[in-house]
Amino acid sequence: MDRALIIGIILGIIMIGLGIWLQLQGTGASFLNFWSLSSLFVVMGGMIASIFVSFPLSNVIGLGEAIGAVVLEESDKMGPVVDEACDVAEIARKGPEALDKAVTSIVNPFFKDGVQMVRDGYALEEITDIMETRIRYREKREKIQADMLRSMGTLAPAWGRIGTLMGLVVMLAGFGGEGGADGLGPGMSVALITTFYGAIFANLFFNPMADKLEVKTRKTSITYSMLVEAARLIFQKKHPIIMREKLNSYIPPREWKRGDVEINA
């Protein structure tokens, strides 16, 4: 699980709960006044229905994958990726047979495909074009996922307002009857709960999750761009020390390593 995500959600819930508790002091109301199953149905049901209208079924079905990408924690360290690339470069200098064995042990599937293309004799321009095309279309796919989460962040408050209007209609319909005025306050409270739910879902969950997915997409693209450069350097049979110095440009300085052997022609 992404620790920052969990911390943020827990902190948000605590702050909201604390704010509600402070406002309840001396009012005679309780936390139960902030619970409405019908409001929850309106916000979540309406939002999901709108997502089905807005996006193709295949994208909606893949929404779980997008949420999973946000929830699952990924390593931020790029140093091990550079280490693996330099190890493969060292092996590649020993000949094609050694490179064959190295390909099977590569962990990153994107880099593995790039090195396999080097081994299969693809031209340098072809390797670069294929790998960069994969990066571009991966970004496009993940942008659709982020757009879906962003739409949910827009739709939740909208359906919250619709639920509030529904509540107002029901409240005003009973206003003229016996004791109608007595139900004005509680009725208005229930009507506004739907807007409250929509705002919470949008600003604590869906919009921040869309932001996090976009950040993860950018970080992955940086890693993949580095691996494109690594595949190019392996094709050119560059020394691992030269490769490391070049790939260090893609990663934070705190993760840099230096070669400990002399560069030989």
Image: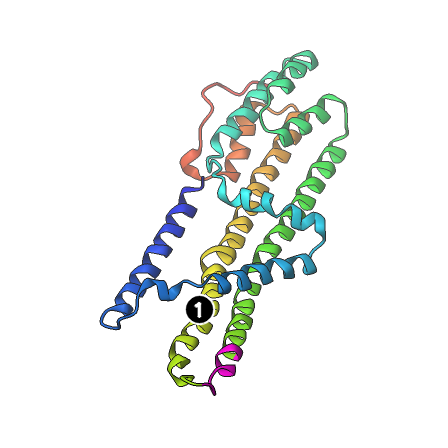
Which is nearer the eye, 203 or 227? 203
Which is nearer the eye, 24 or 83? 24
Q: What residue type is labelled 1?
A: Ile
* Residue 110 vertical placement versus 207 (above, below): above
- Residue holding disc 1: 193
Tell whether 35 sits left or right of 41. Answer: left
Q: Does the magenta stretch include residue 220?
A: no
Q: Quadrant of residue 46?
A: bottom right
* Residue at 69% across, 12% down: 97
* Residue at 60% across, 43% down: 65
Tell whether 258 sits left or right of 69. Answer: left
Q: How crowded is mark 1: few (under 14 residues within 10 Å), some or many (20 or more)?
A: many
Among all residues in the image, which is located at the extreme left? 26
How many marks are shown on the rendered structure?
1
Among all residues in the image, which is located at the extreme bottom? 176
Which is nearer the eye, 120 or 188? 188
Q: Is residue 151 visible?
A: no
* Helix, strand or loop status at disc 1: helix
* Residue at 55% across, 51% down: 214
Q: Can residue 244 be seen in this view?
A: yes
Q: In which quarter of the image is residue 210?
A: bottom right
In the rendered image, residue 197, in percent from the top left (x then y), is placed at 46, 64
- In the image, the segment drawn in magenta is 169-177
Q: Does the magenta stretch include residue 170?
A: yes
In the rendered image, residue 169, in percent from the top left (x then y), is placed at 53, 79
Color style of the picture = rainbow
* Residue 109 vertical placement versus 57 (above, below): above
* Residue at 26% across, 71% down: 28
